Image (tube, rainbow, N blue to C red):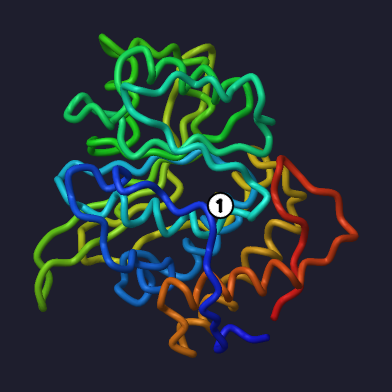
Amino acid sequence: MTGCQSSQSPWPTEPPASWWGYREPPTEPLSLVRLIANQTLDCRIAAFLWIAMEHHASVIVAGAEPRAGKTTLLTALLDLLPPEMTRRYLRGCYERFDFAERDDPAQTYLLCNEISSHLPIYLWGRGVRRLFELADQGFALATTVHAAGARDALALFRSFPLDVPDQHLAAIDLVLTVGRGAGPRGTVYRLLRIETPVLIDGRLDVTVLAERATLLSSLVVTPGALIQLLSERLGLEHRRASSELARRERVLLRWLACGTTGREAVREAVRAFRQATVQDRPRERGGAGEAAEL
């Protein structure tokens, strides 16, 4: 099966309607390949995020403006999770985390639509502290936050009434900052920056992996920095991380050229890619093994 083929088979573990906050859920959320076509991000960054999600990365999508595309990007990334990964959609202020004693941290994603006090379906206060406590214990988390970047988000998490210690915040692997603004043909949505928190002498600092100078400029990235994160934080062997990044970039380019951009078509293409996985390598950090290119 190639990336030009599609299937209408259903995909399990859809998010609840409350995932989209006070808005009506979209009829068809945008796929990662559609976001590439819309120039929100490029194939190399998409390939990097695909590998990161498969290998249990904790991800926060930040954005200063309302409706900057935070939930859209996060939802597209969740479609890349392996089917054996347990997804726990948190219930905002109603969440009791009673699953934490039963679930395997290495095989579980804690999914929070937003860290905010704006709505009861968002997570706030003690629930946020518990979320990061579990992340420090090995659970992966994926959430959104109104923030202008990693430093802004970390300042929010450290402040009252959240008071999350840096030790727990160090479990965050990636902060993806998105933004929107005027383009030549209307509103554009862009991934502006990729950062990773780094714990140094007990205090978190932030390393920038990719960044745009302006909303409409190219995302400047050093491939070595992406490979280093996949290797040092997510446990991939360095050479394998490099080859997988290049291979998946080519796969995404082919899907884009084939017009494989609809959500169901991309899901099926990802599934077929995963089914072609070679099983002669050990799994790492709850992620999939090395895959053969389709």
Q: Which of 231 and 55 is in front in this view?
A: 55
110 sits to left or right of 229: left
Q: Position of residue 161 (x, y in %)?
A: 27, 10
Q: Residue furthest right?
A: 280
- Viewport quadrant of the C terminus: bottom right
Q: Mark 1 points at which residue?
A: 226
Residue at figure coordinates x 43%, y 71% from the top left: 263
261 sits to left or right of 171: left
Q: Toward which corner of the image does residue 247 lie, by quadrant? A: bottom right
Q: Give the residue type at disc 1.
A: Leu
Q: Toward which corner of the image does residue 76 lie, by quadrant? A: bottom left
Residue 57 position (above or below residue 26): above
Q: Where is residue 226 in the image (x, y as percent from the top left)?
A: 56, 52
Residue at figure coordinates x 69%, y 31% from the top left: 104
Q: Which of 99 and 33 is in front in this view?
A: 99
223 sits to left or right of 165: right
Q: Where is residue 45 in the image (x, y as percent from the top left)?
A: 47, 61
